[in-house]
Image: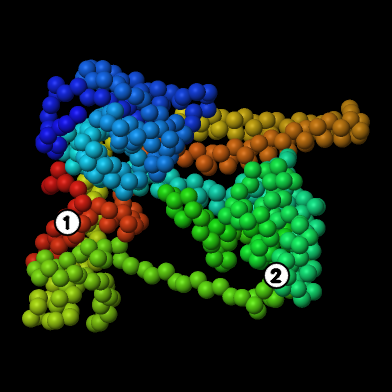
């Protein structure tokens, strides 16, 4: 179907072939499609039927993140666009299409226009065939969606780090030589068959054999490497980057020889995802590993381990380059008088110790190029962040952005967790009182010593089970980050632009011009309909 004048088209008589796209990042606990998906579907279908358009297909990605577009239903949607089956895509709001700023912008500003496909985010008022301020705000909303997803990722990572610090194993698979305790999945116990191989590796290395020789020996003897052992012996669907080799490798031996897990210390956070959008992992420097001591039974004694570390250290070293620190506004600030970039400098003289932003034309070429144009860093920062806060608050107020953001969150379990924790506390207090009364009865010889020990043992076992359940609930309570209250807290932080990162600033701002007379002009990467 051909549409002329894409950006200015307003044709209410056109009968579109509609593709309804529905997405939810977390699956509902009940079987089948979640209620949030159904709510999205009902909301959009009512609108489409009112317009008299054709519903070509409904595409559902239930349980898929919006941080990437590698989703089966979305791929089907794109295939139908390529085959010219649909010419209008509708989502409930922009975040349903995606939360990644860059990829969402690609589809919104390039792919859909190139394919002459109309896109509507219904509750956000975005319609690419209409010339409205809501369309101008779509890049800004994409950034907020992106920031929200990033903040959630950070909070979940913080909870995971807390568990690591407390010595709880949170990995999907136990390290080679150990298995997860069936009674407590956060605890490691020795797998004797694999542990014997670990001990042999240490013995061979201390005796003077090289890692390469150990590799050759094990491969010659056809000893299963850790990846194959977990799959063939432990029946685990284990896959990592080395799985395709199916043999012992130098990296495997070195990892075993340098892993403090084998002396009874829980070592975690040795690698992490590159970021909240990318599934690939990066190695973490040893100084940043999270180690909790004496959390499980050791396979190797400490003296042997320390001897091996000294031997390994003599043969290899690791260098970790320092990270370069850069001001969040550098690279986007220009002199409004001469057009040259402005740079940050710290002035230390006559009792002054402040950071200023100065015209590079003046600092390099003097007054022949430009007058002495500089501004205090604090003044510039406050101006820019105040403007961003204002636009963000107006955006949320304008389309009730907060309500749309939390509309599809799963049911809040925070209160249920809290109620159960209170019941456990009450029962623990009851048990404490019961045991005390039993003891008084024993003293008074109302019950025998044997009866007291038997009954108190049962109550103590119940108390231990309840305490364990209480700790599990406490961890769940910490991770119940997606309640409406928490969402509002997160969004409030975003609105305030506290600890804002350079990547966010550069997504929102194209350039800032600062004039010698104090005028500051911000050129955004989106049209600002809220000019004061």
Q: Residue at x 45, y 47 (%)?
A: 153
Of discs 2 and 1, which sits in the foreground?
Answer: 2
Foreground pick, 386 / 513: 513
Q: Mark 2 highlights which residue?
A: 211
Where residue 508 sits in the image (x, y, percent)?
25, 52
**Which coloring applies here?**
rainbow
Could you tell which of marks 2 and 1 lies nearer the N-terminus? 2
Q: Mark 1 highlights which residue?
A: 522
Where residue 8 sits in the image (x, y, percent)?
11, 36
Compared across the picture, whether 207 is left or right of 367 comes to right
Q: Is residue 120 visible?
A: no
Relative vertical location of residue 499 with respect to residue 27 in this rendering, above or below: below
Foreground pick, 82 / 475: 82
Where residue 157 sits in the image (x, y, percent)?
50, 50
SS for callout 2: helix
The tag on residue 469 is none
């Amino acid at each position: 179907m051909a549409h002329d004048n894409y950006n200015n088209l307003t044709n209410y008589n056109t009968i579109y072939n509609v593709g309804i796209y529905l997405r939810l990042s977390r699956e509902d606990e009940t079987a089948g499609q979640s209620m949030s998906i159904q709510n999205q579907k009902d909301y959009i279908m009512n609108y489409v039927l009112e317009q008299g358009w054709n519903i070509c297909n409904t595409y559902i990605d239930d349980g898929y993140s919006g941080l990437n577009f590698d989703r089966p239903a979305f791929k089907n949607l794109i295939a139908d666009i390529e085959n010219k089956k649909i010419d209008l895509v509708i989502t409930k709001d922009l975040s349903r299409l995606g939360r990644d700023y860059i990829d969402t912008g690609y589809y919104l500003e390039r792919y859909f226009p190139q394919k002459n496909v109309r896109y509507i985010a219904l509750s956000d008022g975005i319609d690419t065939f209409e010339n409205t301020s809501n369309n101008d705000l779509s890049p800004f909303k994409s950034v907020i969606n992106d920031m929200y997803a990033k903040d959630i990722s950070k909070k979940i990572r913080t909870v995971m780090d807390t568990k690591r610090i407390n010595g709880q194993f949170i990995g999907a698979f136990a390290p080679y030589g150990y298995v997860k305790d069936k009674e407590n999945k956060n605890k490691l116990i020795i797998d004797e068959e694999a542990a014997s191989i670990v001990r042999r590796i240490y013995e061979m290395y201390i005796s003077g054999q090289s890692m390469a020789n150990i590799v050759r020996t094990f491969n010659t003897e056809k000893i299963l490497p850790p990846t194959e052992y977990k799959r063939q012996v432990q029946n685990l669907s284990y896959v990592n980057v080395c799985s395709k080799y199916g043999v012992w490798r130098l990296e495997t031996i070195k990892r075993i020889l340098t892993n403090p897990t084998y002396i009874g210390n829980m070592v975690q956070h040795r690698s992490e995802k590159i970021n909240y959008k990318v599934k690939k992992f990066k190695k973490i420097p040893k100084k940043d590993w999270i180690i909790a001591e004496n959390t499980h039974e050791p396979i190797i004694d400490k003296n042997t381990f320390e001897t091996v570390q000294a031997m390994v250290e003599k043969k290899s070293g690791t260098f970790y380059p320092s990270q370069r620190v850069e001001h969040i506004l550098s690279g986007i600030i220009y002199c409004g008088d001469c057009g040259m970039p402005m740079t940050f400098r710290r002035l230390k003289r006559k009792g002054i110790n402040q950071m200023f932003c100065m015209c590079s034309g003046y600092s390099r070429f003097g007054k022949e190029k430009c007058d002495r144009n500089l501004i205090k860093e604090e003044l510039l920062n406050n101006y820019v962040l105040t403007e961003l806060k204002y636009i963000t608050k107006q955006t949320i107020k304008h389309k009730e952005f907060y309500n749309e953001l939390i509309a599809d969150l799963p049911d809040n379990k925070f209160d249920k967790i809290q109620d159960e924790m209170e019941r456990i506390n009450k029962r623990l207090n009851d048990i404490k009182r019961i045991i005390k009364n039993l003891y008084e009865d024993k003293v008074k010889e109302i019950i025998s010593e044997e009866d007291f020990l038997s009954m108190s043992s049962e109550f103590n076992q119940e108390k231990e089970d309840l305490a364990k359940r209480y700790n599990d609930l406490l961890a769940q309570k910490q991770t119940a980050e997606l309640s409406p209250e928490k969402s509002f807290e997160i969004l409030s932080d975003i609105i305030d632009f506290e600890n804002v990162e350079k990547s966010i600033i550069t997504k929102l701002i194209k350039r800032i011009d600062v004039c010698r007379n104090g005028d500051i002009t911000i050129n955004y990467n989106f049209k600002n309909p809220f000019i004061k």
